[in-house]
Image: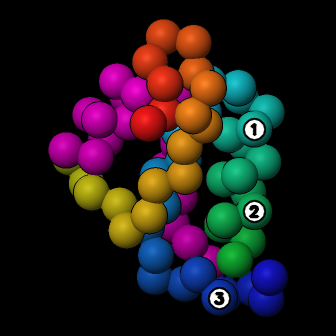
Amino acid sequence: MPPGILTGLKVLVVDDEPDNRQFLMLALQQCGATATAAASAAEAIDIWQQSPPDILVSDIGMPVEEGY
């Protein structure tokens, strides 16, 4: 993806695996997005309520509460 293609987009990344979160955050930021990370569905809901993102990228197979 070209740098800056996602400039201005707020993205919420939800994944229980730290390496996956870090990779997604880095990739999104390199494309210009403002990315925020959450390690669980509960944390994502708290972040969403405080500052709703434009896009949600979520792992659907998390252990406590699935990403759906």
Residue at the farthest front position:
68
Q: Which badge, 1 or 2, is on the more N-terminal residue?
A: 1
Q: Which badge, 3 or 2, is on the more N-terminal residue?
A: 3
CA separation in Å, label 3 and label 1? 21 Å
Labels 3 & 1 near each other (Cβ < 8 A):
no
Q: Which badge, 3 or 1, is on the more N-terminal residue?
A: 3
Which residue is the site of mark 3? Answer: 5
Q: Residue at x 60, y 37 (%)?
A: 59
Determine the secondary structure under disc 1: helix
Q: Seen in the image, is 48 located left or right of residue 17? A: left
CA separation in Å, label 3 and label 2? 12 Å
**Range covered by the magenta-colored residues:** 32-49
Q: Position of residue 55 (x, y in %)?
A: 44, 64
CA separation in Å, label 1 and label 2? 11 Å
Crowding near pointer 2: few (<14 within 10 Å), some, many (20+)? some
Q: Is residue 53 magenta?
A: no
Q: Amino acid at mark 1?
A: Asn
Q: Seen in the image, is 20 located left or right of residue 34? A: right
Q: Residue at x 71, y 28 (%)?
A: 18
Residue at the farthest left position:
49
Q: Is residue 44 magenta?
A: yes
Q: Amino acid at mark 3?
A: Ile
Query: Which quadrant: the C terminus?
Result: top left
Q: Residue at x 68, y 40 (%)?
A: 21
In the displayed structure, would residue 62 be above or below residue 7? above
Which residue is the site of mark 1? Answer: 20
Query: Which quadrant: the N terminus?
Result: bottom right
Crowding near pointer 1: few (<14 within 10 Å), some, many (20+)? some
Labels 3 & 2 near each other (Cβ < 8 A):
no
Which residue is the site of mark 2? Answer: 27
Visible residue check, residue 38: no
